[in-house]
Image (spheres, coloured by chain):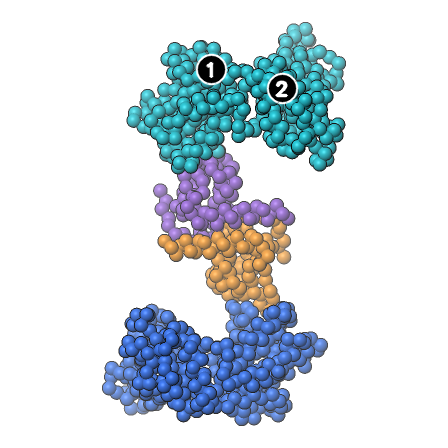
Chain colours: A cyan, B blue, C purple, D orange
Amino acid sequence: MVPAYRSVFKDEAKLDITYVPSRLPHREAEMRLLREFFSFMLSTPEKMAQRVLIVGDVGTGKTALSQRFGADIVQQAKQQGLNLHYIHVNCRQYRGSLFFILHHAVSVFHPNFPKRGFSAEELLNIFLQILDEQNAHVILTLDEFENLIEKEGSEPVYKLTRLQETRLNKPQRISLICILKNVKAVESLDPSTRSTLQSNIIRLEKYSKEQLVDIISDRVQLAFKPLAVSEDTISLIAELAHSEGGNARFAIELLWRAGKYADAEDLGAVTPECVRKAVSSIYAITRKSDLASLSLHEKLFLLGMARFFKENDRAYASITEVEQAYAVVCEEFGVEPHTHTQLWKYLQVLSALGIIEKSVSSTGQRGRTTLICLPGIPAHELERELAMLLEKESG
Amino acid sequence: MVPAYRSVFKDEAKLDITYVPSRLPHREAEMRLLREFFSFMLSTPEKMAQRVLIVGDVGTGKTALSQRFGADIVQQAKQQGLNLHYIHVNCRQYRGSLFFILHHAVSVFHPNFPKRGFSAEELLNIFLQILDEQNAHVILTLDEFENLIEKEGSEPVYKLTRLQETRLNKPQRISLICILKNVKAVESLDPSTRSTLQSNIIRLEKYSKEQLVDIISDRVQLAFKPLAVSEDTISLIAELAHSEGGNARFAIELLWRAGKYADAEDLGAVTPECVRKAVSSIYAITRKSDLASLSLHEKLFLLGMARFFKENDRAYASITEVEQAYAVVCEEFGVEPHTHTQLWKYLQVLSALGIIEKSVSSTGQRGRTTLICLPGIPAHELERELAMLLEKESG
Amino acid sequence: MLIMVNMQIETVLGNKLRIKILKILSKIRELNVTEIARRLGANHKTTMKHLKILENEGILQHKRFGRIRLYRFNENSVKAKAIQTLLETWENAENIR
Amino acid sequence: MLIMVNMQIETVLGNKLRIKILKILSKIRELNVTEIARRLGANHKTTMKHLKILENEGILQHKRFGRIRLYRFNENSVKAKAIQTLLETWENAENIR
């Protein structure tokens, strides 16, 4: 690797997808609105439960807005001696399951709470018991809310929004922030749940090129050494991200990747050429989906497939073949391979995301076989991409 | 008791028999001599073993001189990184037994060293082993040295002074300071031991009245509140102590007692009248012996006797009677009474010190009975004296 | 319910299973009875017996949620703190070797 | 001679007599085997066995003088320090009640 002293980076972590900057340029009005909706939390949190929808396209700052707001209000509440928690759950990560989402929420208070022996409803009651005992209030953010609706329908959302009806005169405990790309997803819910949710909507518009320049400049200051990134470079990244739908996340990822290219070539500065290299290597992938959000074993499985297709000049692979490739990858990364049954589930996930395609062949001697192909992404780019992500994870 | 704020004392502990003042007035020359004798200890301690006799009457500062010297040289040695120990043993307290004296010395390094299963000779070898292992050197002071000679004769002193003869080329480890009232006691030893010891003798003369004034004034400053003790009072104490044989210890005890009388009558100052009361109450006792040096249970036993004679207008008491009185005293002080056999030993001690007298009566029906009397001390004074001492001990 | 107060340290800690329970909870912080029993390799009844002894000594505390009990060190107990320190020290001493 | 290295804490401390030995030495600082056995109410052989286990774990050390051995805590052992802290804490906690 490149020695650290030549790196263009000062603090790479500031470009991580999990990093929430202290200020969000061009989201000041939306932040004020969100604070307004939850202002009661700092005075009479027991009196009501709020529901807010945050709606906007990929990379419009929905998650960052909500997390920044959450961190700030928790800090303020603490100073006032209030026991307020902000819990951010990505519904896709928990497979849209209300049980897993609630288990995560309970785990915030009891990290080793058992996973077996409870229904989602019992878990909700336990969650309320914990909050009652600690006199705590929670803002529960359901990110990628669509996944919960798709998986569970109206029922769990109804439960979460009508908690108080069976709690007599007890204090309110749980407020909700639901984050989604399109408000239409809510329309599939039953009318009463829908109307409860739709009262407070914050819409995030796509960023303009100028706004993206501000956002990128902020991050450049945090993450790079002085003078490592020129204005030209920033402008080019903003331009590309703007044409990518005003996607700030794409901009920041491009910035990081361009920095990596600069380091790889030992340039000492991030040139526009680095940006062009970065964008060409990831264009397809970033469009297809967010590889970073895959679980470790989903990534390893996919890496196994990428290597298979890189090494074999074929369009399709069998389950057995990709499973063997996956086992080799596991050995390389020093982890225990997951079972066949689990790999089937990962195939579903990857297929649902459009990263792979499955087809059933009935031409084989042993009856029907499932065949797998990578439709849109060059195998060597997918491999490099995953290797980068896995390195980032383990390092 | 008198509230503390009215007390004439500032720090009573400075009058305790165990307190060693930092300067010893009118013993400067003797101190210099002692330092001279042991100066090699701070340069080449392994090269020789010193023997010094300190000779002088009661209250001429023998113990204080030796202890002050010991504390100072240990401090100096420490600063130079030398492992020097000063061990002061009162031979009377250890019944003149070399074994007990050496066990005490070993206990300084290993506090719970077992008492059984060793001869004095083995203990001496163990002591040397410990000193060799720690590369330590010891100045062992044998206070009231007469007791060791009386009990054990020449043998143990010979052993202590001829250690090196069986140790080949090993470093010297143990130097001796022997404290005694009269150098004649040494004459009973064999010629070679005697000549080894007699080479370095420091003789302490009785204090003059003027010297006693200096000593008392020093202590008054340390122990009493300002203006609590007048010059007249100091002068009277010095006069009395001078006629008592230039006895500084007597002077300091008188000073303490006079202070107690002043507090008892809430006078706020120690008047000559307090001194006169103190002296009349303790004259006989101080002459007889040092009650303070008795063990706890010897004191309790004697207190029982004092009370018996105070309450019964009789000259003699039986063993059973004093044993019962002792049991009551033990109850009062919350300690477990010692056994009959032990009490017999205490009777021997008290009798040997001349505090009590035993006589055997053969007139009883049940054969011979031991009878006990207090020959020279009024029972009520003995009681007050012991009560004071016991209070001092426990407080 | 067993009620024991003020037991001697050798009575409380002189038992492998109890020290193992304390080791588990020192690492995991908080755990339900079934999971403690599983990690201990003991049955539910035995595990409960030892948990109660440790709880009666004030070293552990538990919280009930529906059918489960979560056990953890008693934060107010100086004994519990000293035990945790010992367990961590032991662990690190072994890692160092 | 028993030689055991790196034993689990529950194996070393999960024994009443061994904790009692540690208690005695924590209070008395240093003691010979016969006296430890007497206070333990155990025979010499049993006492020696437990002392050796504790010494092999680096918790105790001994010094030999003629026929006797004086045992004490190993001053260089962090485990020994943590055990002493626990014993003192327990003692004080009981005095407070």
At x 40% / y 73%, what residue is drawn? B11
Same-chain status of marks 1 and 2:
yes
- The residue indicated by pointer 2 is A238
Crowd around label 2: few <14 · some 14–19 · many ≥20 (10 Å): many
Q: Amino acid at mark 2?
A: Ala
Q: Which percent across, then down, holds residue A66?
A: 49, 24
**x 60%, y 65%: residue:** D63
Which amino acid type corresponds to the residue marked 1 in the rendered image? Ile
Judge whether C82 appears above or below B240 on screen: above
Earlier-in-chain disc, 1 versus 2: 1
Choose between B129 and B253: the one closer to the eye: B253
| Residue C14 vs residue B237, the one in the foreground | B237
Q: Chain of mark 1?
A: A
SS under mark 1: helix
Residue wearing tag 1: A149
Q: Is residue A186 above or below residue A6?
A: above
The crowd level at tag 1 (other Cα within 10 Å; few <14, some 14-19, many 20+) is many
At a point 68% along the width and 14% down the height, the residue shown is A377
Disc 2 chain ID: A
Quarter of the image for the C terminus of chain B: give it: bottom left
D76 or A196, which lies in front?
A196
